[in-house]
Image: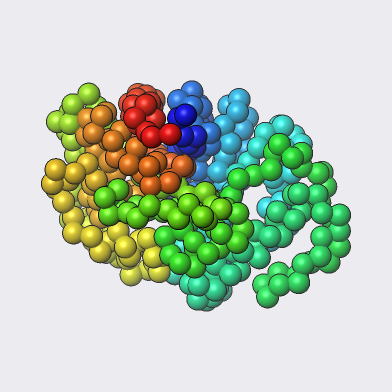
């Protein structure tokens, strides 16, 4: 049997786009992702971006089945409002929406919103947030919840959400607090991974789904792939300085872990590449090389127990076709 995996792409960020072209970029990437077989598409949120719910509605209106994976941050929105938006989109479009539950972000952004909650406590708050959302969406009649951060009494949600439209949840699982939150809420724990050879196999006794966030540049041969990768993500001093500044304004564990690794120019016989991340071009490690080389890395993550893959923003439709070939090869060689 071939292991069952989920693949999500990522929507373009509005702060990297011309406002006159952004709407069409979102539509294009969503359609490419759907045609490539992606189950969903991540829609970012933070203080410097457009509203992810309006972007998600745009995606739904211009595709047939792909699910927006909407990033939600408790500081921005009450859990009732999140549940109401999900049920409303389900009612209006008959489409499913997934949630990427975000505990943190840039410290300066959180403080600007008046939030000074410590890192681990933000995950405790996120657990309560998820429980209220799930309780409302799963049809609790008059939901009552008495937590440290959220209290509701006999709260009802209308319109109701059909069972087949219940959202998958994702939480960053790179820190102990994040992983514990994923376990408690039933969310998929997403990790910004080390190379497969440095990752431990997941504990099979844990009833939790796990995934990794990676970018992929693959071609028929490695030289061609590396040429594309260096052209797309050139190393530069300005990007390095921007990354260093971001390091000072983020308390995310995954950000610290990846930043601590020694950068490599061309993987040093490994397809695992951090230059795009360490030069502030993107926010995840990359796998670069021939189709088979990168497929072997993906198969290694699958063998370790990871079943969800959250990809970076595709630059064009052809790149998703190259990535689809990687996953085809990977699944052919995965152990059952």
Whole-percent x and y of residue 311? 40, 40
Res. 254 in view: yes
The residue located at (70%, 54%) in the rendering is: 134
Above or below, comparing residue 201 to residue 67 in the picture? below
Left of 335 or right of it: where is 167? right
Left of 277 or right of it: where is 26? right
The residue located at (47%, 42%) in the rendering is: 308
Colouring convention used in this rendered image of the protein: rainbow
Total numbered labels placed on residues in the image: 0
Q: Report the front residue among 261 and 241.
A: 261
Q: Report the front residue among 163 and 71.
A: 163
Left of 11 or right of it: where is 59? right
Whole-percent x and y of residue 31? 50, 26
Q: Quadrant of residue 244?
A: bottom left
Whole-percent x and y of residue 267? 17, 45
Res. 20 in view: no
Whole-percent x and y of residue 225? 21, 31
The residue located at (71%, 69%) in the rendering is: 150
Q: Report the front residue among 183 and 326.
A: 183
Q: Quadrant of residue 234?
A: top left
Above or below, comparing residue 57 to residue 81 in the picture? above
Left of 294 or right of it: where is 331? right
The residue located at (60%, 61%) in the rendering is: 184
Which quarter of the rendering shows the C terminus?
Answer: top left
């Amino acid at each position: 049997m071939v292991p069952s995996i989920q693949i999500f792409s990522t929507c373009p960020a509005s702060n990297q786009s011309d406002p006159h072209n952004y709407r069409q970029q979102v539509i294009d990437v969503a359609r490419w992702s759907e045609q490539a077989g992606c189950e969903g598409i991540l829609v970012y949120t933070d203080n410097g971006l457009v509203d992810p719910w309006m972007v998600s509605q745009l995606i739904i209106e211009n595709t047939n089945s792909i699910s927006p994976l909407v990033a939600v941050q408790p500081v921005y929105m009450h859990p009732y409002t999140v549940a109401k938006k999900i049920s409303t989109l389900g009612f209006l479009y008959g489409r499913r929406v997934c949630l990427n539950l975000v505990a943190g972000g840039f410290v300066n952004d959180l403080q600007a919103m008046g939030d000074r909650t410590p890192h681990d406590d933000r995950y405790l708050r996120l657990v309560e947030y998820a429980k209220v959302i799930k309780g409302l969406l799963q049809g609790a009649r008059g939901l009552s919840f008495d937590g440290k951060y959220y209290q509701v009494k006999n709260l009802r949600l209308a319109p109701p959400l059909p069972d087949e439209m219940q959202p998958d949840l994702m939480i960053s699982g790179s820190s102990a607090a994040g992983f514990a939150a994923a376990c408690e809420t039933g969310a998929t724990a997403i990790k910004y991974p080390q190379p497969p050879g440095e990752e431990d196999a997941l504990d099979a006794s844990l009833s939790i789904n796990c995934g990794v966030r990676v970018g992929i540049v693959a071609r028929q041969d490695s030289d061609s792939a590396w040429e594309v990768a260096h052209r797309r993500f050139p190393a530069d001093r300005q990007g390095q300085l921007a990354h260093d500044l971001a390091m000072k304004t983020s308390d995310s564990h995954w950000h610290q872990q990846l930043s601590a690794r020694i950068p490599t120019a061309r993987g040093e016989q490994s397809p695992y590449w951090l230059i795009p991340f360490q030069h502030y071009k993107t926010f995840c490690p990359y796998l670069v090389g021939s189709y088979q080389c990168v497929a072997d890395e993906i198969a290694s993550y699958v063998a370790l127990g990871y079943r969800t893959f959250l990809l970076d923003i595709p630059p064009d439709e052809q790149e998703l076709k190259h990535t689809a070939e990687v996953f085809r090869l990977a699944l052919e060689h995965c152990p059952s």
